[in-house]
Image (cartoon, coloured by chain):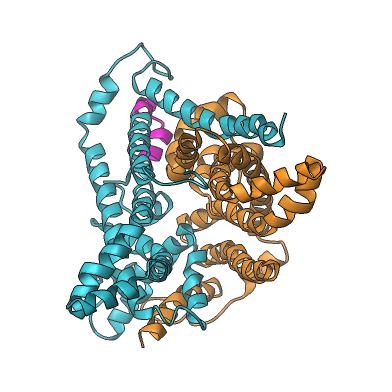
Amino acid sequence: MSSRSSFEPIGLGLFLLLTVFPVAASLLYAALYGVGAVGLLSHGVTLDHWRRVATSREVWASVALSLYVATAVVALTALLALPLALALRTRLESGFLPYILALPLAMPGTVAAVLALQLLSGAGLLSRLAFRVGLTDGVSAFPSPVHDVALLGVVAVHTALALPFFVFLFVNFYTSERVDAFRTLAGCLGASRVQGLLRVALPILLRRAAPSLTLLFVVALGSFEVPLLLGRQTPQMLSVLTYRKYSLFDVAQKPEAYILALGYAVLVLGLVAMVFRGKRFGHEV
Amino acid sequence: MLATVVAGLSVLPFLVLALLSVAGPWEFPDLLPTRLRFDRWTAVLSGDSALAPCLGLSLLVSTIVALLATSAGFVTARAVADHPRRRLLMLLAYLPFAASPVILGVCLLYVYIRLGLVATVAGVVLSHTIFAYAFAVVFWVPFWNPEKLAYEDLVRTLGGTRGHAYRHVILPLSKEPVLVCFLQTFLISWFQYGLTLLVGGGKVDTLPLRVYAYVGEANLGYAAVASSLLLLPPLVLSWLNRRVIGRLA
């Protein structure tokens, strides 16, 4: 047996045990629970739970809210990171700025949510500042983005957390894709600076960053910690709603939790497959 | 000007958190607390606070997860990188990594219940490891490029054993990625909240759970202390990362 093949049984065995089995088992169990084939209140296979989910306004509101938050986070991140990367590109190549901008990368969602509470709530620092300069006349007059209908606080936290990473990513792509050279070439061929930016630089950068932006969409879509702290009781984002339905004393809600989990997993599977279609892994030819 | 604003906004959250952790009475509309108190930190440092055991438990869980995920990921990636169905295996490796931990955790809970792992440290370690391991596999696959495989074959061709190949070639080459992978998987576990809540059943009290518990009790001062402790390893590790990896490189 060659050294190469001797690694296979151990490595693939671990892979089956730690990745394939848990994912497959969990999806299968969720599918079976969703049709009433297993579970505490199982009375045989039925599509009742699926019907209830399909006609639930709470569920559709949650799906719409999650899609809206994920889309808003991706759009805002791209909109802010691109101009920042273009403006700070040279400053980020040396000096202290790259170290300082990298600091927020160390911040988990949990801590960011706590900080958002302190900064953005009705009695938070921004509200106090607004009161001091005479913009508001008290706690209730401040339009707080915490526990608000549009989940602006959740969108803001996720955007703030993703922003430094995408600024670095765009700066990196600007160099690796030789965007400067292409812009110069466009200029030589008669394009204005704005045309060079909009028709050359931005399409290159956005196309290269598309897989990362899609993964950001997936991360924001499945967000749990941040909306748990900054979101509303209703509607809730998908992860929070799934967890709530699962942990309720009303066991009749559990199949709905599993259907939501399954639906989310299938959606993410599709997105991941789409992102990595045509992507090369390692030394694959 | 823009660089200064960006730098200020990057540092501001850390300053606010530090201030909040030592803040005494801080009524609306005061912009600063009326006095500072350091007793929360003194209690943590002397081990009197409920945070000290949480900190220890979080460190233990994350270290075990990082060790398991890094080593298992290294071995698995070796098999995946050389496998004819590498594309499918890589797609599967991304699944737990990309899926929401809470949602996958809800689906997996039945398995944990059957194995008697709910509300145990072992269960929490296993649940974190599944996610960290998936990351480690994705991380290690590019390491096993044709060059590394050729080095291994070269040692064997020259009469060396597999042990020689690993001791003298592969492991020295993997020092830097081992460190990076260890740090990243440590942080995946360190920040984990939803899975710990689900699988730990509220009995495995790690730092992220403490943060939410304090927020629930409207105790923002202690929530800030717990958050600061949560931030310490990533900040120290990113500094170490730069120093140690810089030296190794």
Give the x, y percent position of residue A213. 34, 56
Examine the residues drawn in magenta and state their main secondary structure. helix
Which of the image's four quarters has the N terminus of chain A?
A: top right
Q: Residue at x 26, y 63 (%)?
A: A203
| A247 magenta-colored | yes
Q: Is residue A5 above or below residue A208?
A: above
Q: Which chain is orange?
A: B
Q: Furthest-top residue in view?
A: A44
Image quarter of residue B47:
bottom right
Q: Furthest-bottom residue in view?
A: B1
Q: Is residue A275 above or below residue B79?
A: below
Q: Furthest-front residue in view?
A: B158
Give the x, y percent position of residue A215. 38, 51
Number of numbered discs visible in the structure rendering: 0
Q: Residue at x 66, y 67 (%)?
A: B249
Q: Residue at x 59, y 30 (%)?
A: A17
Q: Is residue A285 visible?
A: yes
Give the x, y percent position of residue B110. 51, 27
Q: Is residue B99 above or below residue A229?
A: above
Q: Tell me where the magenta segment starts and ends, as one range.
A: A241-255
In the image, A270 versus A175, the foreground residue is: A175
| A200 magenta-colored | no
Q: Is residue B26 visible?
A: no
Q: Which chain is cyan?
A: A
